[in-house]
Amino acid sequence: MKKRLFVIGNWKMNMTRAQAKAFLRKLKVPQSARGTVGIAASHTLLPDMKFPRGVVACGQDVSAYESGPYTGDVSAKQLKDVKVQYCLVGHSERRLFHRESSEVVARKAVQLQQQGIIPIICVGETAQDRKQGKTKKVLAQQLKQSLQGVNVGSCVIAYEPVWAISTFQKTRHTQTATLKDIQEAHTYIRQVMNRQKVGVGKKVPVLYGGSVTARTSADIMALSGVDGVLVGGASLVVSSFTDIINNALHV
Ligand code: PGA
């Protein structure tokens, strides 16, 4: 049976409205595409984005609060208002640059679910965690704490080893996660999810992110236990993002 895969682009803090418009005009998603293709774009871009058929709007972050005096924050309700269907929470750039704890990540995920938006909860160990043999411990802890109060039957998990994300690499392509690294982590994440709720480990979509390119995406998506990819840098170029979407068709 062919898999139903997720291909989610994470544009991070890139693109102006004109650039986004030009990108979307060129983006073609094949009719036969199964699964979910989405783009997580900056809040300023979302209201204007005319997504081609088969592409959904995603957010990159959300407030942990419902509404009120939280200057600079954007609420789940406001994301819903601009038709966001999925939203990243706990991306390592939020955890590290904004000191977001897993408890905060959980509150954000709950806010999203209250609005019917599916949270894509990001977890992943740092290079140091891995070197110290703490990968599993860190993943288990991040998952447990980031899922407090969250309906685990209605979320997506993204495994993004921090050391493999292009942002954190000193030299591009020096440290890409191997297929074995990815497979092991995904298997473990499913075991931990099962501890949260029996049976959920099998059902919850678990995506991989970290320097995914058109060249590597097919092998990654073909791994058992991998339900798709979260793509940063390669999602900013129409041709490479399109190639990744097309690769998903053949897995
Ligand atoms: P990258 O980013 O593909 O550029 O490594 C992935 C991410 O941070 O989601």
Image (tube, rainbow, N blue to C red):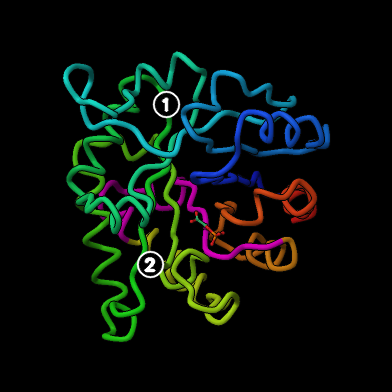
Name which residue lies at 42% across and 49% down: 157
Q: Is residue 67 above or below residue 178?
A: above
Q: Are marks 2 and 1 in contact (CB under 8 Å)?
A: no
* Highlighted magenta segment, given as a residue range: 192-213
Please identify the quarter of the rendering in which residue 224 is found: bottom right
**Is any atom of residue 1 visible in this view?**
no
Q: Is residue 202 magenta?
A: yes
**Is any atom of residue 215 visible in this view?**
yes
User: Looking at the picture, how far across and down is residue 81, in whole percent?
Assistant: 45, 13
Q: Is residue 94 above or below residue 81?
A: below
Q: What residue is disc 2 on?
A: 188
Which residue is nearer to you in this view: 155 or 78?
A: 78
Which residue is nearer to you in this view: 125 or 227?
A: 125
Q: What residue is disc 1 on?
A: 117
Name which residue lies at 26% across and 43% down: 105
Which residue is nearer to you in this view: 243 or 166?
A: 166
User: Type of residue at label 2?
Assistant: Tyr
In the image, taking residue 139 as reference, residue 15 lies left or right, namely right
Q: Is residue 50 magenta?
A: no
Name which residue lies at 22% across and 17% down: 67
Mark 1 surroundings: few (<14), some (14-19) or many (≥20) residues within 10 A: many
User: Type of residue at label 1?
Assistant: Ile
In the image, taking residue 49 as reference, residue 166 lies left or right, namely left
Please identify the quarter of the rendering in which residue 31 is found: top right
User: Looking at the picture, how far across and down is residue 188, in whole percent?
Assistant: 38, 67
- Ranked by sequence position, the earlier of labels 2 and 1 is 1
User: Looking at the picture, how far across and down is residue 116, in whole percent?
Assistant: 40, 21
Name which residue lies at 38% across and 61% down: 189
